[in-house]
Image (spheres, rainbow, N blue to C red):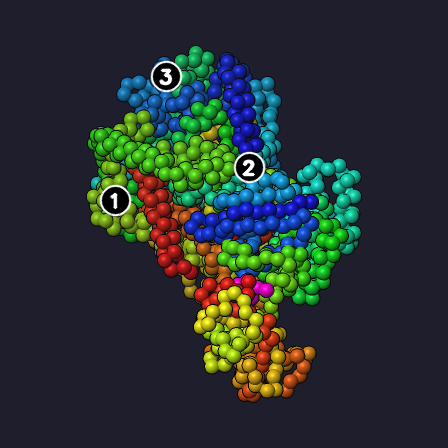
Amino acid sequence: MLLAAVAFALYPVLWVVALAFSSHQTPEPRLLPLPEGPTLAHVREVVGAGRHLADGQEQWLFGRQLLNSLAVSTAAAVVGILIAIPAAYALARFTFVGKRAGVSALLATQMFPAVASAIPLYIVLDALHLLDSRMGLVLCYSTTSVPFAIFQLRAAFEAIPVDLEEAAMVDGATRFEAFIRVVLPAARPAIAVTALFAFMSAYNEFILAATLLGKEEMFTLPVVLQRYIGEHDANWPAFAAGALLVSAPVMALFYWAQRHLVAGLTAGAVKG
Amino acid sequence: MASVAIERLGKRFGATTVLEGVDLAIPDGAFAVFVGPSGCGKSTLLRLIAGLERPTEGVIRFGERDVTALEPRERDIAMVFQSYALYPHLTVRENLAFGLKLKKLPPREIDARVAEGSRMLGLDALLERMPKQLSGGQRQRVAMGRAIVRRPGLFLFDEPLSNLDAALRGQVRVEIRKLHESLGTTSIYVTHDQVEAMTLADVMFVLNRGRVEQFGAPLDVYARPKTRFVAGFLGSPSMNFLDGTLAFEEGAWSVEVAGQRILLGEKSFGGLVRGRAVTVGVRPHDLTVERVPFGGLALTLTFVEELGGESYAYAFVDGSPFVVRLEERVSVKAGDTLHVAVAADRVHLFDRETGLSLRC
Amino acid sequence: MLAARLLAFGVATFALLVSTLAGASPVRLWHAYRGEEQRALEALVASGAAGEVELLAVPSDAFAAKLGAAIPLGEGPDLFIDAHERLGDYVRQGLVAELPFDPAAFAPSAVRGVTLAGRTYGIPLSRKCVALYVNRDLVLSHPEWLEDLASSVRSPLASGYVLLAYENRSAYYHAPWLTAFGGELLAEGDRFGFVGERAERSLELAKNWLDRGWVPSNADGALVAQLFRSGRAAFAISGPWLAGDLHSESLRYDVVPLPKVRVTGLVMRPMLTIEAVMASPRGARRPEALKLATWLASREAAGERMRRAHVVSARTDVELPADPVLRGFSAAADSAVPMPTSTAMRAVWEPSEKAIRKVLNGTLDPRSALREAQRRFDDVRRPPPPPASRTPLVIAIGAALIAAALALVRRARDPVFRAEVRASVPAYRYVIHAALVLVLLVFGPLCAGAAISLTAGRPGDSVYVGLANFWAILSARGGPLFASGSFYCVLAVTVAWTLLNVACHLALGLTLGVLLSRPVLRMKAVYRVLLILPWAVPSYVTALAWKGMFHRQFGAVTALLLRARAFGVDVEPIDWFARFSTAFAANVATNVWLGFPFMMVVTMAAMTSLPREVLEAAEVDGATRWQRFTKIVVPLVRPSMIPAVALGAVWTFNMFNVVFLVSGGEPDGQTDILVSEAYRWAFTRQAQYGYAAAYSVLIFGLLFGATRLSDWFRRKAPL
């Protein structure tokens, strides 16, 4: 049963792998996804991507763009979590006027198709002078990840006994100190997992990045990947190779986080 | 060190009144116990004293200081929680040092206090462990240690033993009392367990429905309950209650219960009015078995429990359950008739309507 | 709070940076070139002949959207290189400025292509069209007539070989067949041209070729390339991009113009795309930008581009190199018809391709299919609703504001409420920054997006029309309420899609989650990571992998079915996207694959809070494994699963990627869900953003109503 499930989960991914390492543009149809005429050419093509400069030199871009992706996603995850944490804490611990309305509004954001807000968002960022910048992208990604993060973290905070904060407050902490020094560390797994989600959704995002970024050295990897698909034709193997390279850090993160994943989601699962 | 004085304290959550008009005073250095059934407001009272809740009305004073509006951290208190509330991400040592670090004590001082506290509670071997690696008893000790190292003016305990097994509970109870005697810090201890209340308290406060029903030295309260509630709450098995009517015949007071008679003696005291409807309270321990039926109750036993050293015999009197503690092995069995009597000064009398004792 | 401070600091420093850098800037040039063409352009720019240039290679998918977002705000490029057929849209949106040039040296068709209403908007660079690729190993001679293709091959083609590889389901590739019968896709006066006898005969011919097995079914660009490159197609119809693929191969091939069709005697004329350098309004005011544009279109640059990138120049005064492929394309371009620039052209593709597919699948005869296409075209092209009076809107907003103000005043007087607000102050300190950021960057744009639903028309000339869009959607545009493609029909598909997916996610996720929660399981970590994999890989990649697996002739699923046939199970290869049931199934399979890890993880999490004693007690009580699962595990994890299921349902309801990338709505838009339908209205049907926004608002309303309803039910009957 498990093996069958693993095969089911792995099979399409293996096709991507096969395509990435095939020497041909498109692999022959067959049952087993094995690369045909195995080659690293496409990987090299993707990794080595660069451009000519005016002085005739080649500028290497892939590394820079990988860094962009990692930096933007990490920053988005951190900023998103920083915004979400206090709000989630307030929702978990305080009663206040407007709480219910706030929660409904948060849920509502998940229901509105995101496509509709791209252009207005562009105008807002323009007003903030944040177009064409990684900062603007970070801001967009972090805010789009905030509602889900708030839900996750709120559940996590609710699962932490109030006693802990009260103990800290009796021990001489202010409410805020108790929150920072006791509640946050106790919620670490949940925070890590929520951050991972935020990181991932930012890391894989393409439409906003393609719309907002206006300089090649600022592109994130999904935008670069999309460049391998033209209007009439596509460089599928390079696309696949790029996809694998893009996924590698996420897979590594997942492997590292898989134990926390369950612990971190436990809280989330107990109370939505 | 501080005494605690509370005046007209009240607490409402929305429409529910949890505490009302609570007045109490705890002398400096005393070990006070709040006891009562669940929902009586004892934990809320403790949380008000800790500053974790704000009272709706009333004043709390530590010594001369009015602390009513102060934050918990400003009250110089330490608290042991029912769940222990150990910080899960800190080692035992860090747990102990947490409050001291917040106070920004010099590291040397912190080390010294942690060492002292852990020696007192036998935590030396556990200092580098995480809370989840500890047994229930060990966690409880760490929670106490965390309170002790802070050297507060007031210790608060919120049912600290309720998560331990019976044997350990007895042992730790003794230790808590010893600790109190060596530290001499004013302590307030909340429990629903009357044994803990009786054994630990210098002064005991029995709470019911958001009010203090009675307070005093434990044995006084046990011997002279002011209300039917206190009488029934303290003692195990609990007091037997029978409804009856006061009578005065042949120069002696008695209570008539379902055609039988419980003698109260000749001495008269206030509230004795002929024909008054009362509730009689008799502790199972105060009943003696009579060979000759005179001035007592005849019981038809329904069930007998033999515990080895003593036995409990169960019966119904006028439809109410009735328990008798038998000292030696009286060989009785279900269906036997037993005649029991009670010394007149051990009979508790309560007004049937108000539940107040007639003896005080 | 720290975050808010950091943010403010970052914004301030960045604004400072921007203002200092705003001085003299290089000319910004955007393009979507790749490979050789990109290198050629970079080399041209790097030669420094036209001053300082900042190049940006944009993904072609995002090109138009990016221009549309940036240029109206004064951002974006000074110059951009794009295909002429988008000019109609660009002019209408004001994205492009007039760019006069001397037409003498250019091919007349190229000049025509960039001319709208007598003005030229861009200088032509290159001409692109499809031509006939001939595999010299399989073919004896270059046939002049289409009908002679079959007889010109050396020997009868073996199985696995095809005579002519081309993307027969695409209207772009069908256009030459149509012109050979004297037809055109868009007729005079922006009328739908793909209708009538000529169109029918062209379709009959294409269908005939398919039925004979001469052309592959369901061919996309990748498949055509693969067939021809591997020498298994005698002929192929494709553009210059295919030649780029063939460099490394030892294949011997020629490129010639498309043949004539004997029944009419007419040439198959492909559609011509003219790539031109265009100027944004800002760029048109910068002399250095105009200088660069002129230079890029100069004879010298054209020659360079031809040598380096092997593309046919739009100029006629450039000497052709000896490259036979280039010469073939050049000849083909001379006979090609420029693609119409009218915005009506954008409304042609979707109905035409639906008709072509229906005919090729054999579900409809050409006449009915084309009539249906015409109806669709006319429906999309119908004039926008008349501008409505703004008074009802103003009154409604005013009334709402007054009511809100009154309610606020009344509550503000209520001492209890005031006390509550005072008590809430500490909490507000924790939420204020999140609220601000969300309002500014999430709710604001969403509301603005929702407001678009009250307008009609394309960006640039939209008018307020009140609730007309909603009325049109809800009345199924005046057609039968449950016709294919109507709101209600799509809604039914969406609901079925959501239910089926969530059910499968749950079934699979629960089972695996329970299995993985068993205390004794070796290599638990490995299983977990492998099973989470579908979640970790970007979905736009894996969705495409799935689409490939479902290909009728060459997909892995087909290979699997064929393998099954070897074991005596008789299955025919299925054309997955020809029928609703199979296309829907393919979508569901993909989405189940993508979504089950989430449910699995949630189940594992819920299982950790499940006391083991309970399961052991059930085991002692004699429950079987299945009974333990259904009677103990499921009821106990249910409360913790409900929020996850609700969220999963919302996500599935709006799962655009899978539907768009896997089935693409095929067949005939039947597998489209509400979100992909909204997307089509916005991006493939004449940019009717208002209409698309109305769809979004309806989707939101439906989901919000549904969650409210389920909440209410749950409160009434607690689970």
> Is A137 in front, or is C705?
C705
Q: Which residue is mark 1?
A: C474
Residue at x 58%, y 50% (from the top left corner): B24
Instruction: Please state the chain letter of the residue tagged with numbered disc 2 in the rendered image.
Output: A
Distance Cα–Cα, label 1 vs label 2 = 42 Å
SS under mark 3: loop
Which residue is situated farthest in the front direction here? Answer: B251
Q: Which residue: 57% across, 75% down?
A: B265
Mark 1 Cα shell of 10 Å, populated few (<14), some (14-19), many (≥20): some
- Amino acid carrying mark 2 in the image: Leu
The residue lying at 32 percent from left, 26 percent from top is C460
Tell me the kind of residue under disc 3: Leu
- Among the 4 quarters of the image, the one containing residue C678: top left
For the magenta stretch, what is the residue range? B224-231
**Residue B238 coordinates in the image, percent (x, y):** 57, 70
Residue C410 higher or lower than C204, as above or below: above
Drawn side of residue C203 relative to residue C14, left or right: left
